[in-house]
Each structure stands twice: as C-alpha cells, then as structure tokens.
Image (tube, rainbow, N blue to C red):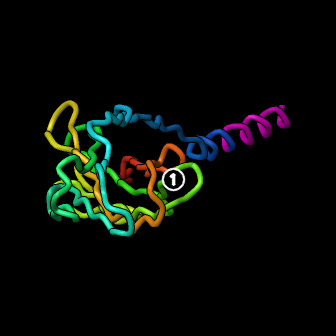
Amino acid sequence: MKTFKNLLSVLAIAAVFSAGAYAQQDVQVSAIVQSTLAFSAVNNVTFGVITQNTEAVQGANGNTSLTPANNTNASSGSVTVTGNAGVSIAISYNTGVQLSDGTNTVDFTPEVMVGSTTIAQSGTNVTLSGTTGLGTALVEIGGTLDAIATAGTYSTTSGTPITLTVAYNIMI
C-alpha cells in the first residue's frame, strides 16, 4: 500500500509540473492575390522612310522631336500595362536591340517612358493608375536608330526586338 501511495504521489507531482509544459496556439494564414499583369500593344515604333547614312531619332512621349524632321510617317511606340490599381510595378527592358534587313544590322538605342518618368534599362518603379480595381500605365517607346550605310528594309523581325519586363514590387 505504501508503494501504491508513493506511486500516486509521484504521478500527482508529475501531473502538476507537466501541466505548464504544454501550450497550443493557432496561427492564421492569409494571402493577397494580385491580378495578372497584362500587356496590350497600342503602337509599334516606326521611323518611316529615312535617308541612308543619317541617324534617326524618334522621341518617346513626344519629348524629343523626330530627326530628320521631314519624316511624317514616323511614330513612337506604346504598350499599355494593366494590373492592380495603385500598385507599384518595376519596368525594365533589354539592351542590344538591332534592326536587320536579313544581311545587315543597325543598332537601336531605346528611350522608354511612362508619363514624364524615364525608364532605365535596368529598371524603374512606377505606380499603376487608379485606386480600386484595375489600373494602367502607358509605356511609350522611342529611341535613336544609328545611321544605316546600306539601303533596304530594316526591322526587329529579322533583328533583336525590344523586350519589356514588368513585375509587381512585392512589399513585405
């Protein structure tokens, strides 16, 4: 009986001391799901007809006048980015853009803007318009086309196009 009492005493003491050694807490899980960023091409960059051995400049956002000035068939390009309104996005683009006629190549140095903000090749943050629902940013593209020594029809179809990259800036 004495052994039984000792055993009960030990079990009672163990129960008292182990009661504080166990705890439990629920952790809630949540996520904010942003809409997929989407592009819609509005306009491609075109220099129209230019003169051989002449550098041509087509400004993005109308900030730079076209050189040569008499080329009326030229236009800057633009792309609309759509995503969550009021959210910051990063926009960047590639280097090494070239036009080709299938044999010869010529370098094109892009000028990319959103409104009055110049987008750096390595990336620049901008905010999509609006406060609720979907917002947009109009990305405008122009640039400088180096002088072309050989007459022909040049495009990025045979060369290296401009590739825009857009991503949400994730705030943690």
Region of the chain picked out in magenta, as a range: 1-13
* 138 shown above or below 148: above
Kind of element beneath mark 1: strand
Horizontal side of 39 relative to 98 (left or right) equals left
Expressed as whole percent of the image width and height from the top left, the position of residue 159 reads 53, 51
Q: Is 122 colored magenta in this rendering?
A: no
Residue 39 picture location, percent across and down: 34, 36
Q: Identify which residue, 40 or 23, lies in the foreground.
A: 40
For image coordinates 22% across by 64% down, the residue present is 68
The kind of residue tagged 1 is: Ser
Does residue 9 belong to the magenta stretch?
yes
**Most common SS among magenta residues:** helix
Estimate the x, y position of residue 49 in percent, counting from the top left: 30, 51
The residue lying toward the viewer, choosing from 32 and 41, is 41
x%, y% of residue 121?
40, 64
The structure residue drawn at horizontal position 28% and vertical position 47%, both measured from the top left corner, is 77
3 vs 59: above or below: above
